[in-house]
Every structure is written in structure tokens, then in C-alpha cells.
Amino acid sequence: MILLTRKADFSAAHFYWNPAWSEEENVRVFGKCANRQGHGHNYTLEITVAGEVDPVSGFVVDLKQLKDIIEREVVSVYDHRHLNFEVPEFATMNPATIPTTENIAIAIWRRLEGKIEHAKLHRVRVYEMPDLFADFYGEGL
Amino acid sequence: MSRLIAHLSRRYRFSASHRLHVDALSEEENRATFGKCNNPFGHGHNYVVEITLSGPVDPATGMVANLGDLDSFTQREMLSVFDHANLNMLEAFRDRVTTTENVCIEMWSIFSRFVESIDHPQLKLERIHVEETGNNSFDYFGEGAPSRS
């Protein structure tokens, strides 16, 4: 089995807010991330898939296809958007979907799972900044 | 509690000096073992420490662990001790060579205290990764971790 990783970038705005809490509680827990005007990041994704090398093509997956799937399912939806208002999985203001780096990794996993032919999604890594990232390896682990 | 387990990693930087030297060895043996790292006046590095925690994503916060808590703990318990210090002078290295392997093990012990201080029984310290230079890095998964060959 071979692991293959493709990177992609998007830039987006967000803030952290749990509507079930008071303003004081939100500020205490989330600090400057609770600023309701929002702020933004250049995010980097690393999408890792696992599969066998095709004896004819020498590929695990067609990289162009993988790039197109990431573009269609994630980047075109997230890039230059406000995650809290414009991306359906975070736009509900449901406290379970605060657009933290952890929840973004889970949401991207759900967008990509089952859509990549000939390989299995292995890991979604989301860098919010070069010094902060979250990894998700799938549900029920 | 959510069953969604995520890994969260945070990188910190500190600059410090050190010298690899073991008192029990002769000068020749020290030089033979540690080479230029045994230079009597010491030398320094810009270290990077990457902490990986895992646990269920708290549905109320969307987080595995609160980064503000981790950052203030790191500032107080690690950076204030290690940054711009001579590692050989630190209490933690009184009986240990200041190799990056031993820095990893010390970081494991420091960040284990962070995990214990958080009221979150499923939070785990997964990995300590320390880069001594851009070309040398070391990982520690804790005592008794399965070998990852």
C-alpha cells in the first residue's frame, strides 16, 4: 500500500462563537477568536489517500482527478468565503459546527469520503497557520 | 461526548545553547563520541517543538484542547525555561546529556503535565517532535509506545 498526499490552499474568514453561551463566556473560552467581526487565515490542506499502485499506470490515483475533486468539493466552496456565513456545514451557528481547525478537518473528510476512486481517504490535515494544524483519520476511530 | 477523534498539533520555537558532554568519559572519548557538539564553549540552535494531542472534539467548543490554555501553559512551563537558555544549566539536564532525544523526553514529561491539568479524561499526548535544525528531527511517543517500524 502507498500513501499519496496532495496539497491545496484556500483563504477564508471565520470566528468562534457558541450561541448557547453569554458573550463573556465566549470571550473567556475563545479569546480573540470570538471577535464577531471575524478574522482570516491562509489555510493549507493535505489530503492523503491510501491505495495500491496500478501496474499499468504506476499511479495510486490520477493526481489530476484528485486535484479536481479537492477543487470541486472543498476549495471552490471554502476559498474567499466567510466560513460562519457562507459554508453550509458551519453556517447554521450550531455549536457543534464552530469552524475550528478540528471541525474543518472533519467537514473536509465528510466532503471527500467516498468520492475518490481506486483509493481510500487516509488522512485530512488542515493547517490554519504553519504552526497549527489538525488531523482527522475518519469517524468511529 | 462526541466520538469524533481529531489530532491537534502546535509548533513552538525556542533558541538555546548546549554542549554534548558526559563527565564520566575522558576528553578524548567525549570528542570521539560527540565531535563538534563537544566544543567546550557550546553552540546553539533554533529549536522547533511540535506537540500533538488527540481526543474527542468537544461539541461545545469544536476543539480537542483550548489553544489559549496550551499557549499559556507552554509559555509558563516550557518557553520561559528553555528560550535563550543554556540547556546544560537546566535542572532537567543535570544528569542527562542535552541531546535532542533527551529534549524530546523532557518535553514529553512537561506536556504530560498539561494533559493531566485539563479536566478531559480522553485527552492524550500523542507525540513530541523536536527539530534541532532543519535537517535533524526527533520524535517521541512516550514510554511503552508500540514501535513504528
Image (cartoon, coloured by chain):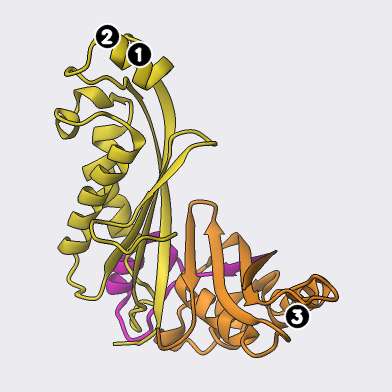
Tell which chain the image draws in orange: A
- One can see residue B43 in this view: no
Q: Residue at x 45, y 87 (%)?
A: A139
Determine the chain carrying the residue at label 1: B
Of the residues shown, which amino acid type is indicated by label 1?
A: Arg
Q: Label 3: few (<14), some or many (≥20) within 10 Å? A: some
* Residue B66, position as x, y percentages in the image: 32, 65
Q: Which mark is residue B27?
A: 2
Q: Secondary structure at mark 1?
A: helix
* Residue B115, position as x, y percentages in the image: 22, 62
Residue picked out by circle 1: B31
Give the residues in magenta: A8-36
* Residue A54, position as x, y percentages in the image: 77, 77
> Do the dots labelled 3 and 2 sit on one chain?
no
Determine the chain carrying the residue at label 2: B
Residue A33, magenta (yes or no): yes
Do the numbered discs 1 and 2 sit on residues whose CB atoms are within 8 Å? yes
Of the residues shown, which amino acid type is indicated by label 2?
A: Glu
In-image side of A110 versus A33 (left or right): right
Residue B63's place in the image compared with B147, above or below, is below
Tell which chain the image draws in yellow: B
In-image side of A28 versus A126 (left or right): left
Mark nearest the camera among 3 and 1 is 1
Residue B8's place in the image compared with A111, above or below, is above
Q: Secondary structure at mark 2?
A: helix
Residue picked out by circle 3: A69
Q: CA distance from mark 1 to mark 2?
A: 6 Å
Between A72 and A137, which is closer to the camera in this rendering? A137
> Do the dots labelled 3 and 1 sit on one chain?
no
Do the numbered discs 3 and 1 sit on residues whose CB atoms are within 8 Å? no
Residue A131, magenta (yes or no): no
Q: Secondary structure at mark 3?
A: helix
